[in-house]
Image (cartoon, grey):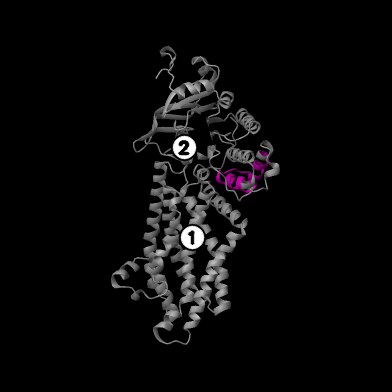
């Protein structure tokens, strides 16, 4: 037999190479499609400008309204980390479904964990393409410098991105198991967090029974933390630790859900029948 | 003493059921290393399910599959880099150029010299003029050649093909078959081929497994089957099997 030896697929280097292959695949796709690139910036910019002017309209008011309004730009930018992070993860996954390429990938040496790692990298890449220009626009239009939050921003980002990946894992697993009929979840599931994680108002605004639900969600602590730093000038490390603890549980649950749904897809034979 | 070469694929009492629907019903077979084996049967016979189980994409309900000496359920990732698959029903990313697609799959399969491998494949499969074109803008025949290049990027020891020439014109289909023959001759690879094209099976295959209703109903070389059924072509044999025309008892395969 005449077969050239291939790289041992079990080594860490081979694993990293497969992750790099998938990142390269998505990078080629992004590079080849200007509408995809524009879309990454368009909605975050529209959102930020809308909420920015709303915040401006509150300037000069007194009391609770003025305090709430003072955090709108920061809140919308952090919300975009959560929403766009999940969309970045899920859309990269859905690209394989739309391209009918999943069979090729699942039959290749790419392991599910490596696929997930590549989706996480791409979520950050896509987010950076949209997020960085919009934060710069926020400085130009409204003089709001999110980067000035320094280490607090890093803590906010880490917590929000892990929540977004957890949701992305569940959505991707559901699409693998149920086909593109579950695709709409990719666009809508995170919106459930918009009212519950108190993006634009303090958690005390919610009725008491709903507050206990909100406090189970890591982003709630991030947005409370944002208000603490913008309104009171205090970085609440305790809130970030609580968010991190909940994220560990949420991300682990996301992984378990993804792997169970993947195994379910192999049992049900849906990996080759990935239509609606 | 000639030792029997190890089987590239060994299926033992394989079953796949979806609820009450049994797609593959207690089948067992071996595919000899270096052989070209055809998997024949009408729509719903269980061919694609069987191939998907060999790839580990579908989990068997019962039974066992060994591929290149590894249990495909438990040790799938020890063997996937030594096999590959081509089907007209699975696409490659449309927006990527042919070269980009081959580079990505070369990296996934752990190919050392990817540029060299792409150059070799482009020469062998007449893809040089297509390398910088977007894959989605190619004709059906060109896409099939690109899919075949992807399937050969890791020079697989086991190549699984699901109707590799479906919807191709006769000239392109013949061209593909010639390349498959060349690959097998040069590498000594094992090929398992699901097809509805009887002349293709007669030309390429050493051995044919005939399936119906999820079961193996006959097996033999194309010429052996034609002789046993007293027919002129494998297509006639296929029709006999598909329409349930039984063999005379003395000619029927031992169960």
Q: Chain of mark 1?
A: A
Q: How many marks?
A: 2
Tell me the quarter of the picture where residue B157 sits: top right
Q: Is residue B134 visible?
A: yes
Q: Which residues are magenta?
A: B98-120
Q: Is residue B3 visible?
A: no
- Give the x, y percent position of residue B141: 63, 38
Specify few, some or many for label 2: CA neighbours under 10 Å numbering under 14, 14-19, or 20 or more.
many
Q: Residue furthest left?
A: A209
Q: Residue at x 40, y 54 (%)?
A: A255
Specify the principal SS of the magenta part: helix
- Give the x, y percent position of residue A30: 59, 57
Q: Chain of mark 2?
A: B
Q: Which residue occupies the foreground of this view, A251 or B127?
A: B127
- Give the x, y percent position of residue B185: 62, 27
Q: Residue at x 51, y 78 (%)?
A: A53
Q: Which residue occupies the foreground of this view, B246 or A36?
A: B246
Label 1 and label 2 in one chain: no
The residue pinned by badge 2 equals B52
- Give the x, y percent position of residue B85: 54, 37
The residue pinned by badge 1 equals A87
Residue A275 numbered tag: none
């Amino acid at each position: 037999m005449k077969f050239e030896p291939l790289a041992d697929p079990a080594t860490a280097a081979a694993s990293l190479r497969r992750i790099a292959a998938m990142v390269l695949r998505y990078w080629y796709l992004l590079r080849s499609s200007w509408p995809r690139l524009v879309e990454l910036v368009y909605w975050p910019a529209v959102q930020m400008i809308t909420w920015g002017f709303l915040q401006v309209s509150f300037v000069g008011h007194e009391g609770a309204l003025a305090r709430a309004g003072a955090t709108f730009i920061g809140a919308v930018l952090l919300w975009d980390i959560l929403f766009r992070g999940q969309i970045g993860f899920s859309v990269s996954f859905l690209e394989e479904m739309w391209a009918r390429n999943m069979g090729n990938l699942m039959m290749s040496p790419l392991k599910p964990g490596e696929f997930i790692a590549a989706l996480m990298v791409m979520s950050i890449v896509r987010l950076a393409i949209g997020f960085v220009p919009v934060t710069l626009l926020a400085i130009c239009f409204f003089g709001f410098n999110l980067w000035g939050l320094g280490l607090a921003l890093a803590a906010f980002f880490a917590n929000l991105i892990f929540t977004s990946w957890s949701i992305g894992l569940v959505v991707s697993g559901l699409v693998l198991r149920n086909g593109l009929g579950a695709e709409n979840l990719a666009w809508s599931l995170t919106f459930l967090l918009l009212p519950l994680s108190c993006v634009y108002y303090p958690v005390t605004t919610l009725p008491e029974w709903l507050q206990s639900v909100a406090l189970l969600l890591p982003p709630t602590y991030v947005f409370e933390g944002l208000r603490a730093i913008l309104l009171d000038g205090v970085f609440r490390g305790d809130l970030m630790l609580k968010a991190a603890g909940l994220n560990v549980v949420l991300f682990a649950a996301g992984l378990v859900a993804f792997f169970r749904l993947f195994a379910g897809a192999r049992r049900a034979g849906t990996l080759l029948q990935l239509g609606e | 003493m000639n030792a029997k070469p190890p089987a590239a694929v060994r299926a033992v009492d394989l079953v796949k059921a979806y609820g009450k629907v049994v797609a593959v019903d207690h089948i067992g077979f071996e595919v000899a290393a270096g052989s070209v084996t055809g998997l024949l049967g009408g729509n719903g016979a269980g061919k694609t399910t069987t191939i998907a189980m060999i790839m580990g994409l579908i989990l068997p309900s019962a039974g066992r599959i060994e591929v290149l000496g590894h249990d495909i359920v438990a040790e799938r990732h020890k063997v996937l880099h030594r096999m590959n698959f081509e089907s007209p029903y699975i696409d490659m990313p449309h927006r990527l150029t042919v070269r980009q697609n081959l580079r990505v799959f070369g990296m996934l399969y752990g190919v050392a010299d990817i540029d060299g491998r792409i150059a070799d494949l482009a020469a062998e499969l007449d893809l040089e003029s297509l390398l910088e074109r977007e894959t989605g803008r190619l004709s059906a025949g060109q896409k099939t050649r690109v899919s075949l290049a992807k399937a050969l990027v890791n020079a697989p020891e086991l190549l699984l093909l699901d109707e590799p020439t479906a919807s191709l014109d006769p000239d392109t289909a013949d061209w593909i078959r010639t390349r498959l023959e060349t690959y097998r001759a040069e590498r000594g690879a094992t090929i398992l081929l699901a097809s509805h094209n009887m002349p293709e099976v007669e030309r390429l295959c050493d051995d044919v497994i005939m399936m119906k209703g999820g079961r193996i109903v006959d097996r033999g070389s194309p010429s052996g089957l034609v002789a046993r059924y007293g027919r002129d072509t494998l297509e006639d044999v296929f029709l006999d099997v598909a329409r349930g025309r039984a063999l005379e008892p003395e000619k029927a395969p031992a169960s």
